[in-house]
Image: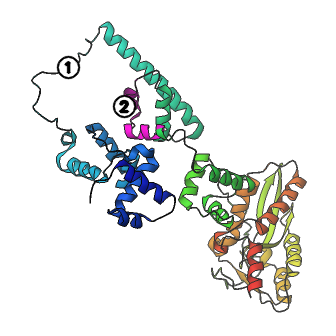
């Protein structure tokens, strides 16, 4: 493989970037390995035409350590690291790594060519302790520490965790007042990290549009979506992004969901007949109106209590219907049943599951189910996992709706609740429903049948 001039390398890079030929085709044409073309293109992208010029460079030991530290911290390849730091041969970095592992840091110092000089370099004299020079140096050091930590504390109060990029930004802002070397030592930031950040300071953020879209989705759903559901919504909008990247961006933007709360308990012992646990945690349904679950939860608003009684279809997690009242009477359940029965056809064979709440033990309730040929099922005593899907819905509803909204009155709360349940059924996507909302999943399944 012969030597190539600057013009030869530039022509090869331009041919590739214009899409005329592949790496391998260009290499075969000019008589070199395709990896050389890959390297030239990387150097050109990172440094422009200057990256293709041959240089006789004597790298310092600190520069070599900074390069190796950067590669270990960021996980970049030899080729990428060489392009970033404008090192013509990626194998050079591999040699530094081997020398460091086998011989230590001292072996990275470059050996001077020719005969050693007989002159001794005069050492820089340190100021005598207690002298005016030493006191001035100490004052300057304290000024630097005060300025640095003040800026870091300001950043910390805004975003919490401080990254190396944040520290590099502080160093950059203070570079006119204090020596960069001293600031980097104080910040414990490698020089390579700092100069890499400075180099990319004026470059546009490659994730700028994605950040806007993630913020839009988060705001659109009023903070109810976590990173996995936002990832699914991005996919629905034609943006395939790894969930870890979405999580990182949300962390940078300070976006997160709220914690769930406990539910209202309605068990009062055996007051009627206990049905067997026929559902037995088999929470999958093959079609709509095959398995329904129900329960009651409690709200406390404006010094009053409200009770919600919904019915959920295990096929798609859709809320079939619900009732809400100021007292947890049986009428709350009976009205809910009447509204839910309107969804049934004569062909449906339904299993209705609940906990052992006193309303579901009553003769009226059991008689209403029997009249519609519905099989009754109950959770085991004190076992919330037997009705976990309903429990999960209550947790989601309270974290996404109750604790995110401000209500003017009980009536305002009821109106907003109706809006949320409509949103939950028609718009809120679920990963287990292939990124669709409950209603979208039901409609798509019925159309495909």
Q: Is residue 339 above or below residue 170?
A: below
Residue 367 percent across, percent down from the top left: 85, 85
Residue at x 30%, y 51% (from the top left corner): 89
Q: Is residue 292 above or below residue 264?
A: below
Q: Nearer the viewer, residue 268 or 337?
A: 337
Q: Nearer the viewer, residue 54 or 39?
A: 54
Q: Is residue 121 above or below residue 81?
A: above
Q: Quadrant of residue 351?
A: bottom right
Q: Is residue 321 left or right of residue 267?
A: right
Q: Residue furthest top?
A: 132
Which region of the structure is painted magenta?
179-198
Q: Nearer the viewer, residue 392 or 19?
A: 19
Residue 185 percent across, percent down from the top left: 36, 31
Circle 1 Cα neighbour tier, 10 Å, few/some/many (<14 / 14–19 / ≥20):
few
Q: How many marks?
A: 2
Question: Residue 256: in sight, yes or no?
Answer: no
Q: CA distance from mark 1 to mark 2?
A: 22 Å
Query: Residue under circle 2?
Result: 185
Image quarter hosting the C terminus = bottom right
Residue at x 20%, y 48% (from the top left corner): 99
Residue 60 percent across, percent down from the top left: 27, 37
Residue at x 51%, y 26% (from the top left corner): 150
């Amino acid at each position: 493989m012969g030597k190539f001039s600057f013009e030869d390398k530039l022509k090869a890079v331009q041919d590739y970037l214009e899409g005329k030929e592949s790496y391998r085709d260009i290499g075969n044409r000019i008589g070199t390995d395709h990896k050389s073309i890959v390297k030239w293109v990387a150097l050109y992208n990172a440094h422009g035409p200057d990256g293709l010029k041959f240089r006789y460079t004597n790298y310092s030991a600190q520069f070599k350590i900074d390069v190796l530290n950067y590669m270990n911290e960021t996980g970049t390849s030899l080729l990428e690291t060489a392009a970033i730091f404008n090192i013509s041969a990626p194998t050079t970095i591999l040699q530094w790594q081997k020398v460091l592992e086998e011989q230590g840091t001292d072996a990275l110092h470059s050996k001077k060519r020719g005969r050693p000089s007989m002159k001794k370099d005069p050492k820089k004299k340190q100021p005598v302790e207690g002298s005016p020079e030493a006191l001035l140096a100490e004052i300057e050091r304290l000024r630097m520490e005060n300025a640095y930590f003040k800026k870091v504390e300001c950043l910390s109060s805004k975003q919490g965790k401080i990254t190396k990029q944040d520290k590099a930004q502080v160093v950059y802002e203070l570079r006119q007042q204090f020596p960069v070397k001293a600031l980097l030592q104080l910040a414990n930031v490698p020089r390579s990290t700092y100069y890499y950040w400075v180099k990319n300071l004026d470059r546009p953020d490659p994730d700028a549009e994605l950040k806007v879209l993630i913020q839009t989705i988060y705001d659109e759903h009023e903070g109810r979506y976590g990173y996995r559901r936002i990832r699914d919504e991005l996919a629905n909008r034609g943006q395939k992004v790894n969930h870890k990247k979405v999580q990182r961006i949300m962390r940078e933007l300070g976006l997160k969901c709220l914690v769930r709360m406990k539910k209202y308990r309605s068990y009062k012992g055996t007051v009627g007949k206990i049905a067997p646990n026929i559902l037995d945690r088999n929470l999958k349904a093959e079609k709509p109106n095959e398995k329904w679950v129900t329960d009651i939860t409690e709200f406390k608003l404006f010094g009053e209590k409200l009770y919600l009684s919904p019915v959920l279809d295990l096929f798609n997690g859709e809320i079939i219907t619900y009732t809400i009242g100021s007292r947890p009477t049986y009428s709350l359940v009976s009205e809910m049943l009447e509204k839910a029965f309107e969804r049934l056809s004569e062909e449906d064979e339904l299993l209705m599951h609940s906990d052992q709440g006193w309303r579901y033990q009553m003769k009226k309730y059991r008689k209403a189910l029997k009249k519609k040929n519905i099989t009754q099922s109950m959770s085991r005593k004190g076992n919330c996992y037997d009705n976990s899907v309903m429990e999960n819905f209550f947790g989601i509803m309270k974290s996404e709706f109750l604790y995110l909204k401000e209500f003017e009155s009980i009536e305002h709360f009821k109106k907003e609740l109706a809006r949320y349940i409509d949103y939950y059924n028609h718009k809120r996507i679920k990963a287990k429903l292939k990124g669709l909302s409950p209603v979208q999943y039901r409609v798509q399944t019925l159309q495909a049948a």
